[in-house]
Image (cartoon, grey):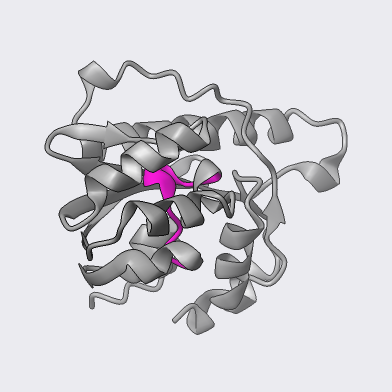
Amino acid sequence: MLKPILHQMATNRVVLASGSPRRQELIQNIGLSAVHLCPSYFEENLDKSNYSFADYVAETAYHKVLEVYNRLTASTDPTERPDVVIGADTMVTMDGKMYGKPKTPEVAFQMLSELMGRQHIVYTGVVIKYHDREVKFTEACNVHFGKATAEQIQAYVDTGEPLDKAGGYGIQGIGGTFVEKIEGDYFTVVGLPLYRISAEMCKLFGYDVTK
């Protein structure tokens, strides 16, 4: 999908405001093979009560991107300065409750126990900053978990996978075995909605796929 703009992208330094090799691989797979990882120092301490779920993830992604863009732009090494910075933030919600990354195995077990056999919503907010131009959006996806026993949940928690995942699971890993079905973009659940990112990147570089 990015083919029409790849010749322009080749002359731009693209940075992903993340330390996730998983997100880097996703970006590379859509054609941006030279994307650089740069974890944001933003503390992700926004007051959740001031935002809707969709706005919260978008605003968190924005602050991640802004911190990375400003820090690298101020670098004394010109090769570090970015042209494009992409950032994302993901959360799991159910019944008005926000499920972040569990800090302990016990919390992970509790989260997963609540989600089992029910539907929840995954929101991923994305920001793309191309110098002084910015795009901010949120994608949502409904995820239906099947049923699982306490023994099965504990076995998954024991793998360690849930501890760095929103909602305590990774759909692209072992956690995907709990997912009965989804309604929406699979990559929104992974944490990087590829279609929307590709479409917005094309528009930023003068190729509007909606026309």
Is residue 132 or residue 127 the one in the foreground?
A: 127
**Quadrant location of the C terminus in the rendered image:** bottom left
The location of residue 93, given as percent across then percent down, is 23, 41
Q: Is residue 121 left or right of residue 6?
A: left
The location of residue 121, given as percent across then percent down, is 21, 51
**Quadrant location of the N terminus in the rendered image:** bottom left
**In the depicted structure, whether residue 67 falls above or below residue 137:** above
The location of residue 135, given as percent across then percent down, is 37, 48
Q: Is residue 180 left or right of residue 25?
A: left
Is residue 79 or residue 18 the one in the foreground?
A: 18
Q: In which quarter of the view is residue 71 placed?
A: top right
**In the depicted structure, whether residue 24 falls above or below residue 199:** above
The location of residue 2, given as percent across then percent down, is 49, 77
Q: Is residue 7 left or right of residue 108?
A: right
Q: Which residue is painted at 62% across and 36% down in the image?
A: 69
Q: Is residue 28 left or right of residue 119?
A: right
Question: Residue pushed farthest right?
Answer: 77
State whether residue 137 appears in this view.
no
Q: Is residue 37 magenta?
A: no
State whether residue 112 appears in this view.
yes
Q: Which residue is painted at 20% across and 32% down in the image?
A: 97
**In the depicted structure, whether residue 40 falls above or below residue 172:** above
Q: Which residue is painted at 49% across and 56% down in the image?
A: 155
Q: Which residues are magenta?
A: 164-172
**In the depicted structure, whether residue 139 falls above or below residue 80:** below
Q: In which quarter of the view is residue 18 placed?
A: top right
Q: Which residue is painted at 30% across and 67% down in the image?
A: 179
